[in-house]
Amino acid sequence: MGYNAATVWYRVPLPGTELEAALEQLRLMNALSAAILKANVELAVRIGTLRSTGLAITLREDQIEIYVDHERGRLVWLLNDAALEACRRTGEKVTVEGESVELPPPPPGPLARSLLIRSPLYSADPT
């Protein structure tokens, strides 16, 4: 699936009925997308500032991945470390129900699991 085997996966059930959870998912994804965009703008400014000082820059890339499972009328997010940290940086409250060092198998059904987002998130540090 293209994920790091050392990744911890966090299980986050979205509250409410499937419709309410879908609306919550949309709200959370908008907040997360805005946070990723803001982080990229801040990174561009930081790189410009660091370059003007003549310092070398180390770029770090974290891969945000969120899968959504459809389980018996509920939506459940599976987030990796970077995605959970990004969600928390938005100020949104996410309740972790469990964690696993492997991506759990999908529940049965044709539309049981889908990839919601896979996005790089960069940061820069002077070296």
Image (cartoon, rainbow, N blue to C red):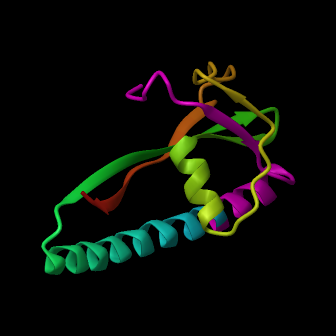
- At horizontal 37% and vertical 76% (from top left) the residue drawn is 42
In which quadrant will I find the N terminus? top left
> Which image quarter: residue 50?
bottom left
Residue at image point 56% right, 69% down:
30
- In the rendered image, residue 57, in percent from the top left (x then y), is placed at 21, 61
- Total numbered badges shown on the rendered structure: 0
Q: Position of residue 33 (x, y in %)?
A: 49, 66
Establish if 69 lies above or below 83: above
What residue is shown at x 84% (from left), y 53% (from top)? Answer: 15
| Magenta stretch bounds | 1-27
Q: Is residue 39 above or below residue 61?
A: below
Residue sitting nearer the eye, 48 or 81: 48
Image quadrant in which the C terminus is located: bottom left
Residue for point 76% across, 61% down: 93
Q: Is residue 102 above or below residue 58?
A: above
Instruction: Residue 76: tell me if it is visible.
Output: yes
Q: Is residue 6 left or right of residue 119?
A: right
Magenta stretch contains residue 20: yes
Q: Farthest right residue? A: 16
User: Where is residue 29 drawn, in percent x and y?
Assistant: 58, 62
Q: Is residue 67 visible?
A: no
The reply, left or right, for residue 12 in relation to residue 4 is right
Q: Position of residue 21 (x, y in %)?
A: 76, 55
- Queried whether the magenta region covers residue 94, the answer comes back as no
Q: In terms of depth relative to the viewer, which is nearer, 6 or 13?
A: 6
Position of residue 42 relative to residue 110, above or below, is below
